[in-house]
């Protein structure tokens, strides 16, 4: 593939996924030529269908655990390829480990070869079930490496280590974003995470499943806010990890009740056993992002949930109406 050297070229692995597709939109909006790489193992071509006619956008169906080759210039490599929800990485444990290790290695290799800036999508899961609250970037985490979630947690921790090794040893210009719970349009209905699960169950009139007693907390960030933070980090000169997320912490049970309220559903709440190593708390310390990036989330949770609900209504209710 040959790319015009006069363009700013950004390669996004996992670009057909939930976050990756929104990132492609943002980069295109900033005037970049975007090469989206995805093998569609969890991504969806529908997320990027609106970009297919854009001359600045190219889609490549490729497994990034294999060698990545491009002719011409590449300015940024943003590595977002990975299963990212428990339902995915419990079903795809080997693929999750491989994309975090081999995939990161191949993406870093591309950045090194092209003298490009590299940004790795890490996660709050590197903190595990945290013993420090809220979680600053300086916290090393509390992770069970052999638990069911370990395939994702350790893959991301390894990817951070490899990124810093390339930065220190090879001089690659790197960025590490630790992404906290995010929601918004283009999430999969069967994603398995709380918000899509609650919304899809409510819209179908099914019981809403809450794991544990619902007292475990999450801090949910609307996708537009998250992408803004990621773009600011990409454009910065910060090589150390930076938390990007919404520090507005909420119990899962309250989140379920809020979704029940905005959907108007009559669903009942049912409680099931908490999964192994499920974090009891999760809240980002975003002091660093505020100070160094001038970033903090802007979208009110209720507004964000309503926007997300509109998307899920189209995905769930409209097909049922037409059938």
Image: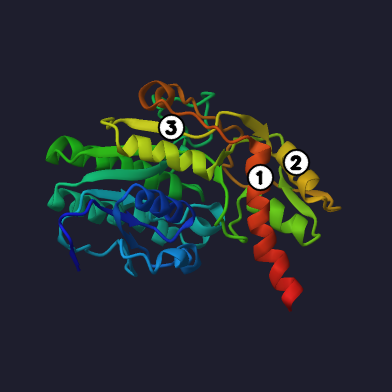
Left or right, residue 53 beside residue 239 = right
Q: What element carries label 3?
A: strand
Marking on residue 258: 2
83 up-or-down from 255: above or below: below
Determine the residue positioned at 13% across, 52% down. Answer: 113
User: Which residue corresponds to mark 1?
Assistant: 305
Left or right, residue 11 beside residue 53 = left
Q: Quadrant of the N terminus?
A: bottom left
Tell us which disc is closer to us: 2 or 1: 1
Q: Distance between the residues labelled 2 and 1?
A: 9 Å
Tell us which disc is closer to us: 1 or 3: 1
Q: Nearer the viewer, residue 246 or 139?
A: 246
Q: Is mark 2 on a helix, strand or loop?
A: helix
User: Which residue corresponds to mark 3?
Assistant: 243
Determine the residue positioned at 31% across, 52% down. Answer: 101
Question: Which of marks 3 and 2 precedes in the sequence?
Answer: 3
169 up-or-down from 33: above or below: above
Q: Are marks 2 and 1 in contact (CB under 8 Å)?
A: yes
Q: Are marks 2 and 3 in contact (CB under 8 Å)?
A: no
Q: Which of 276 and 298 is in front in this view?
A: 298
Q: Where is residue 294 in the image (x, y as percent from the top left)?
A: 41, 25
Q: Position of residue 151 (x, y in %)?
A: 44, 51
């Amino acid at each position: 593939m040959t790319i015009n050297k006069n363009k700013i070229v950004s390669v996004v692995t996992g670009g057909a996924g939930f976050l990756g597709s929104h990132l492609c939109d943002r980069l295109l909006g900033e005037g970049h030529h975007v090469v989206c790489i995805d093998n569609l193992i969890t991504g969806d071509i529908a997320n990027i269908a609106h970009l297919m006619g854009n001359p600045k956008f190219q889609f490549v169906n490729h497994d990034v655990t294999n060698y990545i080759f491009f002719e011409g210039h590449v300015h940024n490599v943003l590595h977002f390829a990975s299963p990212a929800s428990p339902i995915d990485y419990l079903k795809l444990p080997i693929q999750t480990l491989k994309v975090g290790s081999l995939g990161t290695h191949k993406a870093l290799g591309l950045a090194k070869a092209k003298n490009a800036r590299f940004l790795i999508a890490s996660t709050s899961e590197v903190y595990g079930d945290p013993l420090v609250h809220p979680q600053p970037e300086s916290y090393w985490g509390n992770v069970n490496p052999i638990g069911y979630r370990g395939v994702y947690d350790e893959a991301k921790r390894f990817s951070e280590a490899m990124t810093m090794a390339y930065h220190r040893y090879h001089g690659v210009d790197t960025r590490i974003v630790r992404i906290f719970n995010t929601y918004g349009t283009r999430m999969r209905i069967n994603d398995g995470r709380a918000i899509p699960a609650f919304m899809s169950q409510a819209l179908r009139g099914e019981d809403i499943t809450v794991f544990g007693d619902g007292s475990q907390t999450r801090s949910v960030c609307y996708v537009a806010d998250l992408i803004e933070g990621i773009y600011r980090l990409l454009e910065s000169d910060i090589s150390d990890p930076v938390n990007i997320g919404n520090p507005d912490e909420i119990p899962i049970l309250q989140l379920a009740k809020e979704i029940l309220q905005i959907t108007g559903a009559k669903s009942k709440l049912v409680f099931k056993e908490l999964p192994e190593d499920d974090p009891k708390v999760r809240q980002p310390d975003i002091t660093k992002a505020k100070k160094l990036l001038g970033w903090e989330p802007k979208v009110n949770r209720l507004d964000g949930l309503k926007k997300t609900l509109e998307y899920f209504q189209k995905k769930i209710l409209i097909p049922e109406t037409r059938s």
